[in-house]
Amino acid sequence: MAENQTPTNSSSSDEIDLGQLFQMIGNGFGNLFRAFLRVFLYLKKNAIILIGLTVLGSSMGFGLNQIVSKKMKTEVIVKPNLESRNYLYEVVDEIQANIRAKDTLFFKDLGILVENLKSFEITVESLGDTRKNVKQGTKYLELLKGFEGSSEAISDIVRAEILSKNTLINHKIAFYYKDPIIGQEYAQKLMDYINSNEYFTGLISVYRGNANERIKRNIELVEQIDGLIANYADKLAEKDSPVANGTISFDSEERVDLKGLFDLKISSLKDIENKKLELNTKTEAVKVINFGKPREVQKAFFGKSIVSIPLVFIGLFFLVSFLKYLNEQANNLQ
């Protein structure tokens, strides 16, 4: 008889457990709904205060937008030439330091009035991942140590190439000011000052002179090659000028490699193109790629004050209410 009653007790226990589970779930939803009602009643009770804080904050934000003067900026995209990257950072720091110090003599030589430099600021930043480039360059330089004993020339050439790639990265110079007309004018004068360095001016002059001379020599070489090819073409028309393996033979002592002449001509023409391109880009120490127009600077806080100030007021109200609630609970415990 005892064995026949055991399944009945087990089934009854399972039904009790399921009933308790459903009851717990129901209680949980009930508590959640009651919590939602409490929040709704709290907001309903303080609706006038919340609406008042929203209107007050929005009004203050609108007023701040009207009172706070707008700041303008001009962005200049530049490319340092001939390892002038460090110079660019140093000269920008020098200008900014003179702005803070209100150095009248410094700016007088540039035709700039210190009185007009209120809120004026200049910054510079790289537009490339300089840290990554420098890290890669350092890694390659470490690998080159193995070549120092065998071929110092190879090591120097590759080292120069790595350093040039790491330094010739586009940069952005930003000028901040209030008056768009004066600010743009002063930005141009300061860019002229940056490119007035005597060392780099002389270096650019020598570089351009060498490039022009290189172009001239290459043009003469191409003309000579064209003359040789024209003469050989005339000789080729003669019956006793055999051609074998791309080489023309005029007699038993003279042979000309046509392929070598054409390769030399193509190489010279490419060199002329590269030198002309370099002459176009290397006109100054810091090549100006794009000189931007004045545009307004959007500040993080005041630019969105119509939204942010009401949110701050409402947040403070909730914080005060929560502290009052905690104080009441603490008093009840006492």
Image: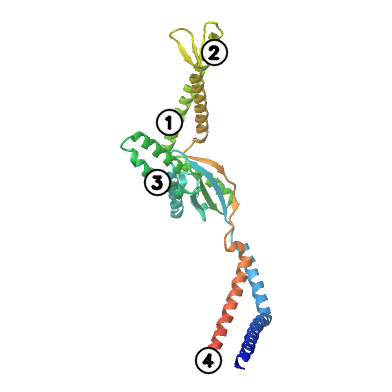
3 or 1: mark nearer the eye: 3
How many other residues sit within 10 Å of disc 4, few (<14), some (14-19) or many (≥20)? few
How many other residues sit within 10 Å of disc 3, few (<14), some (14-19) or many (≥20)? few
Helix, strand or loop at label 3? It is helix
User: Alpha carbon of mark 2 to alpha carbon of mark 1: how far?
Assistant: 36 Å
- Left or right of 110? Residue 144 is left
Q: Is residue 248 visible?
A: yes
Residue type at mark 4: give it: Leu
Tag 1 residue: 206
Tell me which numbered mark, 3 or 2, is placed earlier along the sequence: 3
Residue 157: % across, % down: 39, 35
Helix, strand or loop at label 1? It is helix
Q: Which mark is residue 139?
A: 3
Tag 2 residue: 230
User: Alpha carbon of mark 4 to alpha carbon of mark 1: how far?
Assistant: 88 Å
Mark 2 touches mark 1? (CB < 8 Å): no
User: Alpha carbon of mark 3 to alpha carbon of mark 2: how far?
Assistant: 51 Å
- Residue 86, image quadrant: top left
